[in-house]
Amino acid sequence: MVMTPLPWQRDLWTRLVRQQDAQRLPHALLISGPHGVGKHDLADALIARTLCHAPGETACGECHACHMLASGYHPDLLDISPAEKRRQIRIDPIRQVNAFVSQTAQQGGHRVIRLHPAEAMNVAASNALLKSLEEPGERTLFVLLADIPSRMLPTIRSRCQHWSLGVPDAESALPWLSERLEDAEQARFWLRVAGGLPQFALELAEGRALRQELRELFDALVRGAEPVAEAARLDPQSLDRVLWYGIVWLEDLIRLGVAGDAEHVRNPDLLPLYRQAVKNARVRDWFRLLDYAREQRRLIAAGGNPSAQLVLEAWLVRWASLLRS
């Protein structure tokens, strides 16, 4: 299988290929963009083309290097990500990077280091990576991927050429999503829920049961359900996604409460519930709840390990107090 960029990445891909063919591609790239925009597809296509023995517009998919990559192992590719059950990249994997770049490429081409998410490196790991970024040796390519590059050390960012991926226009994304969901109307709906991020829209559509569960829970809270009991029904493993839905729904509520703007809410099917909720609470209270949810997600992303059940309970108690005020 040939690794290719996504349809909405074609212009960016053309620029990358031109740089690479002109030998003007720097030794370190930072590819950033929100979750679900397709960073990994672009990076994987570039890595495959870099390691390929006979690249064209993309990797050939037929040479020995491409077959090794397709099998899941290539000796000249080092993949760095947080260890299982950890949210941070610590110093030990970065020491592997430093050893890897000092070696000769086994296939006679490039050595490639893919590091994701780059903002997960702690300070010690980031500082250890600096030496390799400053003295990478010949034919070495670093590909760093980040959702939120501002959380990386400035010294790391400054040593990379930064390619930022924005939200694609719907005309580019909808055909791709419609094909995978086999329903154009559903594709439009989920793309709107996901804020225009096609891969995230597909992820949400495939996990739609959680959204339905949260919708029923929201309705139950409006009708006076006990929040701690409702929290016990949620899977603690889904905490981050529960908070994400809460943030998006709060943003919709604030949009509706402040400007009366129903046209641009991301979840139009929830408008009846939104209108009921807006009657029962003040907008400034929604902002406080929004700040709480964002802070909880930030702590999780930073490597915190809160009790998921306690966070869910506190979250729903706050929701319930506003819905009944």
Image: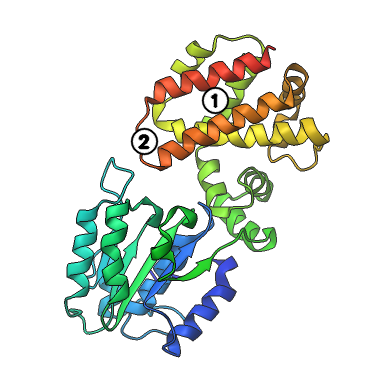
The percent coordinates of residue 75 (x first, y second) are 20, 71
Give residue 226's quadrant in the image. top right
Give above or below for 130 relative to 269. Answer: below
Give above or below for 18 relative to 223. Answer: below
Amino acid type of disc 1? Answer: Glu
- Residue at 56% over, 69% down: 9
Describe residue 197's horizontal placement relative to residue 39 as left or right.
right
Is residue 315 or residue 285 the one in the foreground?
285
Total number of numbered discs in the rendering? 2
Which color scheme does this rendered protein use?
Answer: rainbow
- Residue at 33% over, 65% down: 114
Q: Is residue 129 visible?
A: yes
Which residue is farthest bottom? 22
The percent coordinates of residue 6 (x first, y second) are 53, 66
Callout 2: 10 Å neighbours few (<14), some, many (20+)? some
The percent coordinates of residue 16 (x first, y second) are 49, 78
Give residue 245's mark: none
Describe residue 308's horizontal placement relative to residue 91 as left or right.
right
Secondary structure under badge 2?
loop
Describe residue 190's horizontal placement relative to residue 113 as left or right.
right
Residue assigned mark 1:
213
- Residue at 50% over, 45% down: 203
Which residue is farthest right? 260
Give residue 304's mark: 2
Callout 1: 10 Å neighbours few (<14), some, many (20+)? few
Amino acid type of disc 2? Answer: Gly
Give above or below for 64 relative to 315. Answer: below
Quadrant of the snapshot with the C terminus: top right
The percent coordinates of residue 67 (x first, y second) are 28, 73
- Residue at 20% over, 79% down: 105
**Alpha carbons under labels 2 and 1: distance apart:** 26 Å
Secondary structure under badge 1?
helix
